Image (cartoon, helix red, strand yellow):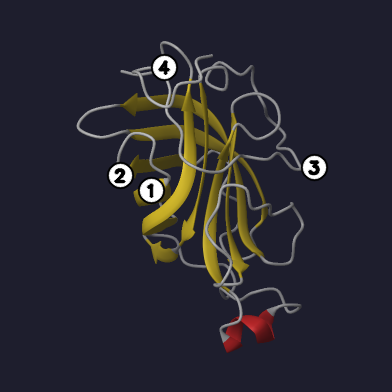
Amino acid sequence: MMNNKMRRRQFFAAGAATAGAALPRVAKAGKFAERYRFVSEHSSGFSFLVDALTNPLTPNAAIADRVRSGALRQRERVEFPYGDGDTMRSLAYFEDPAKPFSADNEVPSGDPRILIEIFTDVTSVLVKNEPFPHLVVIGLIVENPTSTFFGNLTSRVMVFSAALDAAGSDNLSLVVSSTASSHVLGARTGSGRLQISEGGLR
């Protein structure tokens, strides 16, 4: 793997992905994980497309007072690969708004700050260098262990997309994570890392 920031083969933005203890039921051989590694963190908001919530969208009782007071605000993280194989982890969680966005931040599975945690078996990755570095990731959800209001999302299509302001930048823009016929999380800006091995750019 090349170490240069951007020479058609690889580019970075600040941060690092981390793998946690909880892994999904399905994890195939890492065909895409051999070529791509990325993580993003950003503020997020929900949009609901079709399905009604199975339960109210409320935080864990252990942090509810801090959320209501504004001491914790919603963020989203997306990490790939997560654990073994071509597994992508995406989650919405609550964080201190004073804490900087960083791919280095860790949110372990089971943390009471998590609103939603989704594991996706990635089936397609497209990364383009022009007119600016950007990527689209598509896969099938294999597990969503932390989700009391969306119900079972397994077998639905997940699409993640993001762009970097420029080669070598850690600034993400228009970061969107979409679960088919359920919900969309997105932000105009964020922070993250994208690492591409030789032959991964289109």
Outermost residue to the right: 21
Residue 165 — which label?
Answer: 2
Q: CA distance from mark 2 to mark 4?
A: 19 Å
Q: Are marks 2 and 1 in contact (CB under 8 Å)?
A: yes
**Residue 176 in the image: x percent, y percent?**
38, 50
Q: CA distance from mark 4 to mark 1?
A: 19 Å
Residue type at mark 1 is Leu
Viewer can see residue 105: yes
**Residue 130 in the image: x percent, y percent?**
22, 28
**Residue 114 in the image: x percent, y percent?**
66, 62
**Residue 182 in the image: x percent, y percent?**
44, 55
126 shown above or below 21: above
Which numbered disc, 2 or 1, marks the residue that appears first in the sequence? 2
Q: Which residue is mark 1?
A: 172
Mark 1: few/some/many CA within 10 Å (<14, 14-19, 20+)? many
96 shown above or below 161: below
Outermost residue to the front: 4
Outermost residue to the left: 131
Element at label 3: loop
Residue 11 — which label?
Answer: none
Q: Are marks 2 and 4 in contact (CB under 8 Å)?
A: no
Q: CA distance from mark 2 to mark 1?
A: 6 Å
Residue 200 — which label?
Answer: 4
Residue type at mark 4 is Gly
